[in-house]
Structures are given as structure tokens and as C-alpha cells.
Image (cartoon, grey):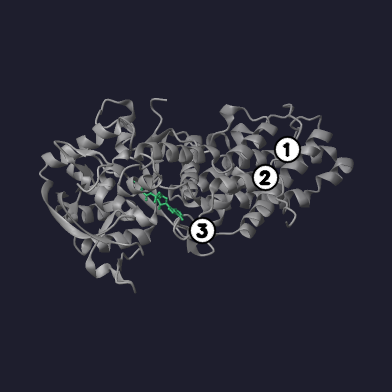
């Protein structure tokens, strides 16, 4: 364990000011797939997700619902955690910014930035959007027919004046640009890197980092009438989770994070503010930040105000957890925006899962059960076709590792399902059901090769469809310690004669409910 390479992955922490939506589900599922992939590739993984519970927006939502902010977030955070659990996400910690260890951690970050001379007290006035928790320049605003002003995001803004602490972000412009240049992988996909680089090049203003107009936040050390700007509080969750500031905490070994998985709308916070705070506090920077795209419902961004939020629990109930996970990761190239529709989900479930993988497993394993004494058949010499089929399966770890290095989840699944497609062609062309009578020894070989391909596919599919993959590996009697990527290939082939359980379907077809 001690010498396993470490891998620390985080999602953004969600605002629990409303129930979780499909965008939240998408992010945590994708991150979970990466975490699981790294685990089966032998890494010591720490995977963290959670909720971002302070700020004016939460305070106002709680006020409106007639509860205290704490009672409100306790209730909502439980829903976010339940969603991650429902979607079978294997997080190691669900962090809440109201957790007891987050206050001392964030106050220590503040102190370190202050000691560096990067924090000063001044006055702030400007157009503020409560919904975005951000100030906007006047030039960015648009006037509404009723005379009010709106932010570029479409949210209402109001004029606010307050005493505020500032962070000397302007002092970090050159160091940030140098960091992007020296670490071309720091921001991805590349389009995001280009956007951020030109944003920083155009000049950075110092950042207002405290508020006095409300109190639902972490108090500024030594000046508790100020609460910290919610983004300092939020971003710092990533080091709180590693035990900061206690650098002798064993979790500290996970820092710096290998990747922060976040949505494209918050890349600026993670690749400009966050690294500048860390540079100021003299802490190592995360290795990578990946900004995924948005999942759109009929082409529109989902949001509570638009009223087109899709409930992830409902999706899981309707289609199944593995099915939804597969759809998210296969349908949308990770990094780009994607569309969700009932037809697209059903098509993926029935074509890729039920037909391609489910049927192949069911047909081949049933034949084994009936004709091979319910045990792994004894193969004869491999033909070229057998060998080619096995090689394709054996090549999966290398191919998928290469794709996963850049978080290309869709490519990884395409690689795995290309082998499934090839296995279907192999099975159809070898016609083992005819060999049963004409050449049973050859039938055994074909069934063995098919089972061996299913073993590789089962191992590789675990990060994406964990429950179905586990079922498949159980049907092949693969021991728990034989389920890592290292077990794919000739050295760990199925042993002839191993007893197999009674086959059972792994992916049912999705049948349309009767129109009501
Ligand atoms: O931004 N499709 O929280 P949040 C895909 N608390 N991803 C989406 C999405 C969609 N339709 N809608 C939102 C916050 N997201 C802050 C983060 S991190 C220190 C603080 C993504 O609840 C969004 O991009 O608004 C973000 O990564 C995550 O969901 C949480 O969004």
C-alpha cells in the first residue's frame, strides 16, 4: 500500500441551494469513473466530492424557506450525498464547507496570504449578482426594459458598497502565465486553456475577498465582522480534505491534487484565483484542472430558474444506475457540451448494453452452462481468428490508459465497445451452436475465447458500469483480486474446469411503458 502511486481527484463542491440536478450527477459520475479506473490500475486513490454551503445565495434561499441556513444546508447536503450514493459513486470523503475542520483550514490559508502581504483592507463598490456571487463591470451589464440591469449571465445585479479585504491578484499575472506555459496540461481541454490565458494576459484586477453585508460564511481571522468571499472558502475545500494545515496528517500526501474535475463555467476560479491563492500561501498547485461541458436538455442549459432541471433520482429509477452512467460517459465527448433525451438514452441502453454486451454474455454463458458442464471450457489450439480476438482484448489496458490520461471517457468506452462489437462478429462467424454437433472441441475453444474476451471487457467496464461489470465477472468466477487492469492478458487467462454459476442477464432491454 505504502508505495502505491497516489491519485487525488475532486469534483467541484455543489451549491446546495436547491436539489441536485443532472449536471451535478454528470460531474460526480464522470469523476467516479476516473477514480475507479485509477483504482483498478493500481493507484491509491482519494476521491472527494461535497457541498459548498456558505454565501449570500444560501442565506437568502434559507430565509425564504423560513429555516436557518444551517438547517437548510443540512437537509440539502444530505440530498447531494444521497445522489452520489444512488449513482454508485465511490467517494472517499463527502466534504461540507460547514464541516468543523474547514474553518481552521481556511483561516490558515487566509493568514498565510496575509503574512505574504497579499491581503489589504479597502472599499468595494460595484454591481453585484447575488445569484452568481460575483461582481461585474458596468460595461458587461445589459439594461432591461424595466430599467434594471443584468449580468452577462442574465442574472439581476444590484449596486453594493462595502468595506472589503482585497487579494493582490494583479501581482500574480506573470507567474500564472509562466505556470500555464511551463505546464501545458494544467488547464484542459485546450480551448479552456486558450480562454484563460488570454483572460489573464488582458490584465488582472485585485480581488475583493470579504463581505460585511451578511454573515453566513467563515469569519475573517482577527476581523469577524467580515466573512470570507465564498470562493476562497469553497476552493480551500480541496486542501481541507487533505488535512491542511496539519502537514503530518497522512492525507496530506495526496496534495497536490492530480485533477480537479469541474464545469466549464468555473474554470476561471480554479485556474486563476485558486493557483494564485496557493502561490501566495506557498502551497503546491494542483496538477490539472479539467473543465467539462454542460449537459443540456433540448439544447438549453439546465437551471432552476428556467425550470428544466432533470431529477437524477428519477433518471436512475427510470433507466437504471449503470445505464445512466454509461449514457453520460459514452454519449458526450468529455469536455464538450452534450444533449440528453429519452430517445438517446434508450437507444444506448438497448443497442450497446442490452444487445451488444448483454446478449453476447447471455448467449455464450448459456451455451457454456448447457454444453460444458457449467465450467470454463477446455480450449484447443488457437486459430488465427482466436488469436486476433484475444489480442484485441489484451490490448485494452494500454489503449484505455492512453485515453484516460486525457480523461477521454467517451474514447475509452468506444475502445471497449469496439472489442465487444468484434467479439459479436467473432461469435457469429464461428457459429459455436453448429460446432456443438460437428466439432465440440472447436466449440469449446470458441466459447473459451469468448469468455476470455468477456473477462477483459468486464474488468475494463467496472469504472463505468460497476454493478453490471461485477455481475459479469461473478458469472465468469473471476476472483476479487483478479479484477485489476494488470489481470487482463495471457498470464491471467481463465482456468479451464473452473465451475461457473448459473448465467443471468446483466443488461435487460429498456421497454417503453404503455402510453398513459
Ligand atoms: O459552481 N451540466 O456549484 P454549482 C454539467 N459551488 N455540469 C454542470 C451543469 C450542467 N448542466 N450545471 C452545473 C458551483 N454543472 C460552486 C463550485 S468548487 C470549489 C465551487 C457543474 O452547484 C458546474 O459547472 O453551481 C460545477 O462544476 C458543478 O456542477 C457544481 O455547480
Measuring from the top left, give residue 246's x and y in whole percent.
25, 28
**Relative to 86, is 97 on the left or the right?**
left
Task: Residue at the far front: name it.
Answer: 66
Measuring from the top left, give residue 24's x and y in whole percent.
46, 48
> Which residue sits at x=17%, y=44%?
280
Q: Foreground mark, 1 or 3?
A: 3
Which SS class for mark 1?
helix
- Residue at the spot of label 1: 448
Q: Quadrant of the C terminus?
A: bottom right
Instruction: Confirm whether residue 415 shows in the render.
Output: no
> Which residue sits at x=74%, y=27%?
497
- Residue at the spot of label 3: 308
7 up-or-down from 23: above or below: above
Which SS class for mark 2?
helix
Q: Residues within 10 Å of mark 1 (few under 14, many from 20)?
A: many
**Relative to 419, is 82 on the left or the right?**
left
- Residue at the spot of label 2: 387
Q: Residues within 10 Å of mark 3 (few under 14, many from 20)?
A: some
Q: Foreground mark, 2 or 1?
A: 1
- Foreground: 380 or 182? 182
Which SS class for mark 3?
loop
Q: Residues within 10 Å of mark 2 (few under 14, many from 20)?
A: few
- Quadrant for residue 114, please give it: top left
Q: Foreground mark, 2 or 3?
A: 3
467 up-or-down from 305: above or below: above
Amino acid at each position: 500500500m505504502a508505495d502505491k502511486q497516489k491519485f487525488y481527484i475532486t469534483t467541484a463542491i455543489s451549491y446546495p441551494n436547491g436539489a441536485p440536478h443532472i449536471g451535478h450527477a454528470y460531474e460526480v459520475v464522470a469523476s467516479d469513473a476516473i477514480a475507479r479506473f485509477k483504482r483498478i490500475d493500481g493507484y491509491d486513490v482519494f476521491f472527494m466530492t461535497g457541498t459548498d454551503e456558505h454565501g449570500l445565495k444560501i442565506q437568502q434561499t434559507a430565509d425564504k424557506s423560513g429555516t436557518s441556513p444551517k438547517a437548510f444546508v443540512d437537509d440539502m447536503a444530505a440530498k447531494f450525498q444521497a445522489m452520489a450514493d444512488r449513482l454508485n459513486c465511490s467517494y472517499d470523503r463527502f466534504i461540507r464547507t460547514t464541516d468543523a475542520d474547514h474553518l481552521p483550514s481556511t483561516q490558515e490559508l487566509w493568514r498565510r496570504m496575509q503574512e505574504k502581504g497579499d491581503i489589504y483592507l479597502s472599499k468595494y463598490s460595484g454591481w453585484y449578482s447575488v445569484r452568481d456571487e460575483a461582481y461585474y463591470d458596468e460595461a458587461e451589464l445589459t439594461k432591461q426594459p424595466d430599467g434594471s440591469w443584468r449580468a452577462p449571465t442574465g442574472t439581476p445585479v444590484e449596486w453594493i458598497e462595502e468595506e472589503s479585504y482585497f487579494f493582490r491578484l494583479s501581482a500574480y499575472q506573470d507567474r500564472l502565465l509562466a505556470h500555464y506555459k511551463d505546464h501545458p496540461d494544467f488547464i484542459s481541454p485546450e480551448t479552456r486553456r486558450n480562454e484563460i490565458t488570454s483572460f489573464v494576459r488582458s490584465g488582472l484586477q485585485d480581488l475583493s475577498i470579504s463581505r460585511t453585508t451578511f454573515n453566513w460564511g467563515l469569519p475573517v481571522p482577527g476581523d469577524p465582522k467580515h466573512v470570507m468571499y465564498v470562493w476562497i472558502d469553497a476552493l480551500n475545500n480541496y486542501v481541507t480534505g487533505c488535512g491542511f494545515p496539519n502537514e503530518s496528517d497522512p492525507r496530506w500526501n495526496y496534495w497536490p491534487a492530480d485533477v480537479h474535475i469541474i464545469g466549464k463555467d468555473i474554470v476561471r476560479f480554479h485556474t486563476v484565483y485558486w493557483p494564485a491563492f496557493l502561490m501566495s500561501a506557498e502551497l503546491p498547485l494542483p496538477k490539472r484542472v479539467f473543465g467539462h461541458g454542460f449537459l443540456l436538455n433540448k439544447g438549453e442549459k439546465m437551471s432552476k430558474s428556467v425550470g428544466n432541471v432533470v431529477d437524477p433520482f428519477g433518471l436512475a429509477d427510470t433507466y437504471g444506475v449503470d445505464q445512466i452512467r454509461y449514457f453520460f460517459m459514452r454519449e458526450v465527448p468529455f469536455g464538450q457540451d452534450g444533449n440528453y433525451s429519452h430517445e438517446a438514452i434508450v437507444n444506448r441502453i438497448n443497442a450497446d448494453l442490452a444487445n451488444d454486451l448483454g446478449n453476447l454474455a447471455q448467449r455464450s454463458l448459456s451455451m457454456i452452462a448447457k454444453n460444458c458442464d457449467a465450467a470454463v471450457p477446455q480450449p484447443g489450439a488457437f486459430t488465427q481468428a482466436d488469436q486476433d480476438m484475444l489480442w484485441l482484448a489484451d490490448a485494452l489496458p494500454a489503449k484505455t490508459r492512453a485515453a484516460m490520461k486525457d480523461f477521454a471517457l467517451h474514447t475509452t468506452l468506444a475502445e471497449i465497445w469496439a472489442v465487444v462489437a468484434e467479439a459479436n462478429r467473432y461469435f457469429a462467424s464461428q457459429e459455436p451452436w453448429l460446432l456443438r454437433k460437428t466439432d465440440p472441441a472447436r466449440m469449446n475453444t470458441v466459447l473459451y475465447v469468448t469468455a476470455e474476451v468477456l473477462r477483459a471487457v468486464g474488468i475494463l467496464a467496472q469504472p463505468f458500469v460497476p454493478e453490471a461489470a461485477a455481475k459479469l465477472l461473478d458469472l465468469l468466477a473471476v476472483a476479487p483480486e483478479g479484477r485489476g487492469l494488470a489481470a487482463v492478458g495471457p498470464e491471467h487467462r481463465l482456468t479451464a474446469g473452473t465451475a461457473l454459476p448459473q448465467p443471468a442477464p446483466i443488461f435487460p432491454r429498456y421497454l417503453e411503458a404503455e402510453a398513459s
